[in-house]
């Protein structure tokens, strides 16, 4: 059963066992070393005591020997051998005169022994009163423990008495003690192993249950629970794990419902939706987008199947790739697909700012079998949750994900709308062309009759002919304006840009309206800064916009007034500012927001006796839009009107 235990059990068991073994071994070594030290200290004290006692008895004999008494040396030798062999326990006794001569030794013949004045314990005793050493004895050929005591005072020393005992005797005693200690240690170690086993079993069982439950939860089994026993920390951990499992189950259920709701909503959207992250990786594509772009792969809203899929790999249309990775508000041209190849065209491409975020638009015409599909693509900068866990934030919270930039692309099928607009445009163009012929005939007939002598004298006929001529001219002007609008809205009409000298354009406008200004009693004031200002632009569109503004200024200004046309270069952003200013009757604030609508005309006070077609400012707005510029109007009743055009110097 124990063999099947996990790694934690064995780590806990072996760790506790090793700890107890080390503790018991350290205790045995400590006791052994302590006993050895105490034994050495006791032995030293004992030898020193014996040596001092013997020194008291042997001193008279040493003094007698020093005075020349003949039997003193034999008596010293007899006393030494008697003490060294009295059964006290293998003691060796040596008596040494102060000059190193051995007077007696219990283990050897003193007369044959060398001088001992160089022995370290004897030198130490002569100097300090006593000394000790453990060293090898050449006399008895074994290691000995020596303790020497001086006989006499430091200034009246006679010699040294030395007691010694063999180290093997001490070692034998030490080994006997260690055998006892290790026997006790063995029993203790056995108990320690049993204790370690019990501790390992006690702690590993609940941890194993916690581990098994956590593993089941990580594998998706949210029915797994831990049986809680007791009230200690492990029980609290088990309770927390069960609570976490329950919370996780609730959150997963909520996430699943939200994901399924998102999938159903995206699947039912009539617009295509594509989301890319800051590294141009696809995050989401809904089925409508896949259908519109004819993408064969089916994607889901949770991102399955899109790992590592980039915009370039998944989106074949280049313009959409640019829209999905553009983040600086750059403008994008529209594209059409013809026989599988993409070519640029100037279709309904717009770019602007909404809510402080860059928004780009492009229109695509994609070939589908025998027909084609027109798609309006709109891109917007968005913020996506990142994948990096922020420092100090809890996983799963909004703060745990670092936001990152992304792109949202919305695709709208405008095929039917495009066809409807094209039909309307074609109808207007065709109707206008058809109306020009009868209008020309009516005007010709009216002019002929007005020049005829038969009707010159008839006031009623003359008034009717002038009415026919005036209204036919107005109708012809309206037809021309409708044709201009039709050309601006047409997807096939191109306005090629070229280099335009602004001062030359100003001169042409002055010459063109010289007669009309003279008839109206007005003065035209033109100004261009810098004088050699040039720009790359469609001169036809710019001239069309300025002509309509000048004609309006002439029409609605009183005699003696001034019409000003100014051009200025803003070098900071490369935009040319055109201003057309008059001193006419002005426009009320209520009407200023609608003057650029088609056929909208202000009250009679503004229109004057001769009403216009209501298309002039609409033509201006469309012309400036094709030039990728902006138009704004500033007016006050009784003061005058100023219209400003901001056109990029680089052109459209």
Image (tube, grey):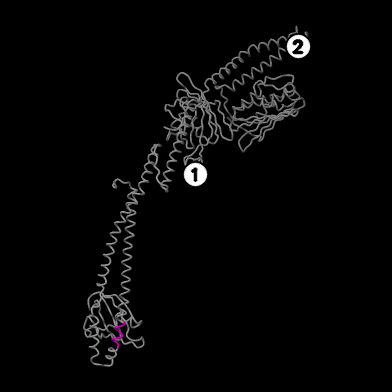
Residue 463: numbered disc: 2
Mark 1 or 2: in front is: 1
Q: At numbered mark 2, what does the secondary structure look like: helix, strand or loop?
A: helix
Q: Secondary structure at mark 1?
A: loop
Question: Residue 587 appears in which quarter of the rendering?
Answer: top right
Q: Residues within 10 Å of mark 2 (few under 14, many from 20)?
A: few
Asked if residue 334 lies left or right of residue 527, the reply is left
Quadrant assignment for the C terminus: top right
Magenta segment, which residues?
A: 52-59
Q: Main secondary structure of the magenta part?
A: helix
Q: Quadrant of residue 355?
A: top right
Q: Is residue 199 above or below residue 506?
A: below
Viewer-closest of 4 and 347: 4
Q: Which x, y percent locates residue 118?
A: 29, 81
Q: Residue furthest front?
A: 230
* N-term-proximal mark, 1 vs 2: 1
Percent position of residue 198, x then y: 33, 51
In the rendered image, residue 539 lying in the magenta stretch gets the answer no
Q: What label does residue 393 carry, if any?
A: 1
Residue drawn where x is 72% and y is 9% of the image: 449
Q: Is residue 543 left or right of residue 143?
A: right
**In whole angstroms, how far apart are the C-alphas of marks 1 and 2?**
88 Å
Inspect the magenta stretch and tell me whether residue 54 lies in it.
yes
**Residue at image location 48% in from the left, 21% down from the top:** 372
> How far from the left and from the top, in percent, is residue 95?
27, 84
Please say if the residues under marks 1 and 2 sit with CB atoms less than 8 Å apart: no
When asked about the image quadrant of residue 18, the answer is bottom left
Number of disc labels: 2
Q: Is residue 120 visible?
A: no
Asked whether residue 348 appears in the rendered view, the answer is yes
């Amino acid at each position: 059963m124990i063999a099947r235990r996990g790694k934690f059990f064995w780590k806990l068991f072996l760790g506790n066992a090793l700890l107890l073994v080390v503790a018991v071994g350290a205790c045995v070594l400590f006791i052994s070393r302590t006993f050895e030290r105490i034994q050495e200290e006791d032995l030293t004290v004992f030898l020193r005591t014996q040596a001092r006692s013997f020194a008291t008895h042997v001193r008279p004999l040493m003094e007698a020997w020093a005075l020349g008494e003949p039997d003193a040396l034999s008596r010293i030798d007899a006393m030494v051998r008697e003490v060294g062999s009295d059964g006290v326990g293998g003691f060796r006794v040596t008596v040494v005169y102060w000059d190193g001569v051995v007077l007696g030794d219990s283990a050897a013949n003193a007369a044959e022994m060398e001088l001992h004045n160089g022995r370290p314990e004897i030198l130490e005793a002569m100097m300090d009163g006593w000394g000790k050493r453990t060293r090898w004895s050449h006399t008895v050929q074994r290691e000995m423990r020596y303790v020497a005591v001086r006989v006499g005072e430091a200034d009246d020393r006679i010699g040294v008495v030395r007691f010694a005992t063999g180290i093997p005797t001490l070692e034998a005693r030490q080994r006997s003690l260690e055998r006892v200690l290790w026997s006790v240690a063995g029993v203790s170690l056995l108990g320690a192993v049993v204790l370690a086993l019990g501790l390992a079993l006690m702690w590993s069982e609940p941890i194993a249950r916690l581990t098994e439950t956590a593993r089941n939860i990580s594998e998706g089994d949210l029915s797994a629970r831990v049986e809680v026993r007791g009230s200690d920390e492990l029980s609290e951990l088990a309770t927390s794990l069960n609570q976490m499992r329950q919370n996780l189950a609730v959150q997963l259920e909520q996430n699943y419902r939200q994901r399924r709701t998102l999938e159903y909503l995206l699947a039912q959207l009539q617009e295509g939706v594509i989301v890319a992250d800051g590294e141009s990786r696809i995050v989401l594509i809904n089925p409508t987008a896949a259908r519109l772009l004819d993408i064969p792969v089916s994607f889901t809203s949770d991102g399955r199947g899109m790992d590592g899929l980039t915009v370039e790999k998944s989106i074949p249309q280049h313009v959409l790739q640019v829209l999905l990775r553009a983040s600086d508000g750059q403008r994008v041209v529209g594209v059409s697909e013809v026989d599988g190849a993409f070519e640029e065209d100037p279709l309904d491409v717009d770019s602007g700012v909404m809510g402080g975020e860059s928004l780009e638009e492009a229109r695509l015409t994609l070939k589908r079998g025998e027909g084609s599909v027109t798609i309006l693509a709109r891109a917007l900068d968005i913020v996506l949750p990142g994948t990096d866990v922020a420092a100090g934030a809890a996983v799963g919270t909004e703060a745990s994900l670092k936001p990152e930039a992304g792109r949202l692309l919305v695709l709208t099928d405008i095929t039917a709308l495009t066809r409807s607009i094209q039909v309307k445009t074609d109808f207007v163009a065709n109707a206008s062309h058809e109306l020009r012929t009868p209008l020309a005939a009516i005007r010709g007939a009216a002019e002929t009759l007005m020049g005829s002598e038969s009707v010159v004298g008839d006031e009623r006929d003359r008034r009717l002919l002038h009415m026919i001529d005036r209204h036919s001219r107005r109708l012809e002007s309206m037809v021309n304006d409708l044709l201009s609008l039709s050309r601006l809205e047409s997807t096939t009409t191109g306005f090629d840009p070229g280099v335009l000298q602004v001062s030359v354009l100003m001169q042409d406008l002055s010459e063109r309206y010289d007669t009309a200004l003279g008839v109206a009693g007005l003065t035209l004031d033109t100004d261009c800064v810098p004088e050699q200002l040039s720009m790359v632009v469609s001169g036809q569109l710019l001239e069309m916009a300025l002509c309509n503004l000048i004609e309006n200024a002439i029409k609605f200004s009183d005699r003696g007034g001034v019409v000003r046309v100014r051009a200025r270069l803003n070098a900071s952003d490369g935009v040319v500012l055109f201003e057309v200013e008059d001193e006419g009757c002005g426009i009320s604030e209520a009407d200023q927001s609608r003057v650029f609508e088609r056929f909208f005309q202000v009250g009679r006070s503004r229109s004057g006796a001769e009403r216009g077609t209501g298309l002039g400012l609409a033509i201006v707005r469309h012309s400036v839009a094709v030039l990728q510029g902006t138009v704004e109007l500033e007016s006050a009743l009784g003061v005058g009107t100023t219209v400003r055009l901001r056109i990029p110097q680089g052109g459209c």
